[in-house]
Amino acid sequence: MATSVLLVGSGLIGRSWAMLFASGGFRVKLFDTEQQQITNALENIRKDMKLLEQSGSLKGSLSAEQQLSLITGCSNIQEAVEGAIHIQECVPEDLALKKKVFAQLDGIISDDVVLSSSTSCLLPSQLFAGLVHVKQCIVAHPVNPPYYVPLVELVPHPETAPATVDRTHALMQKIGQSPVRVLREVDGFVLNRLQYAVISEAWRLVQEGIVSPNDLDLVMSHGLGLRYAFIGPLETMHLNAEDSGLLTS
């Protein structure tokens, strides 16, 4: 029998995670408080998987029907956690709501389950404060849309056990994602901090009349973006320095 994962929340991110885990052969339980929400989510997943299969873009070695058979809905949280080795929270980006969800899960899970949040900006020290199972807690922040963009930022709470990070890293790799370890929590994590820096400078260059908005976007889409799609800024500097002594071009 396939290993089970639980997704708490059946919105866009929850559905994307469900498709990714199913592509890796995991049994998936999709939990939500409203049965109609679950029904709608399962129907959307079916449509998406069928379209992906028709276009040859479906992930994994299983057919769409085989993957769909691995995904079930559940509106009872007690039943939902049974047998799950990994729980991925996917509720809206509201600290109070997420803390309420984790407090509820904390009271019913065993000591060998990873509790993970999909938050894009809330710090683990805020999310997991006071939980009994804090050593099992971690942020696994996907990039939207997760099915097409493989990066996942793993951000530990100061008390997260190294084994929790290792397990989550291995799990993300198993479903075809590209996990990175953020060694300690910081506002914005890594991706958003880099993104904010680029956006801030882009606005400055346009506002100061240095370049038009269209040409600014061309600089990225026809220049830096093409380069950074293959290698990052540090490797770019390293290769340029080795080759020509230049750091930026």
Image: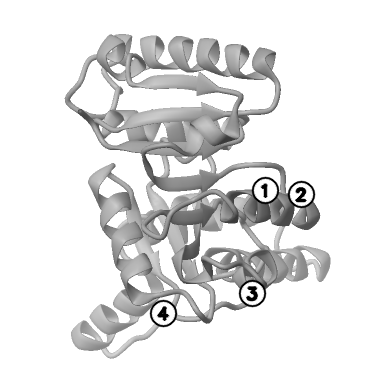
Q: Callout 4: helix, strand or loop?
A: loop
Q: Which residue corresponds to mark 4?
A: 248
**Quadrant assignment, res 239:** bottom left
Q: Which residue corresponds to mark 3?
A: 125
Nearer the camera: disc 4 or disc 1 = 1
**x and y percentages locating residue 158 in the rendered image:** 53, 81
Q: Is residue 98 left or right of residue 15?
A: right
Compared to residue 177, the image places residue 158 above or below, namely below
- Sooner in the amino-acid sequence: mark 4 or mark 1: 1
**Quadrant assignment, res 186:** bottom right
- How far apart are labels 1 and 2 at the CA level? 6 Å
At x 61%, y 55%, the residue is: 119
- Sooner in the amino-acid sequence: mark 1 or mark 3: 1
- How far apart are labels 3 and 4 at the CA level? 37 Å
Compared to residue 201, the image places residue 7 above or below, namely above
What kind of residue is marked 2? Leu
Nearer the camera: disc 1 or disc 3 = 1
- Sooner in the amino-acid sequence: mark 2 or mark 4: 2
Q: Callout 3: helix, strand or loop?
A: helix
What kind of residue is marked 3? Ser
What kind of residue is marked 4? Thr
Q: Is residue 15 visible?
A: no
Q: Which residue corresponds to mark 1?
A: 101
* Type of colouring: one colour
At x 49%, y 51%, the residue is: 109
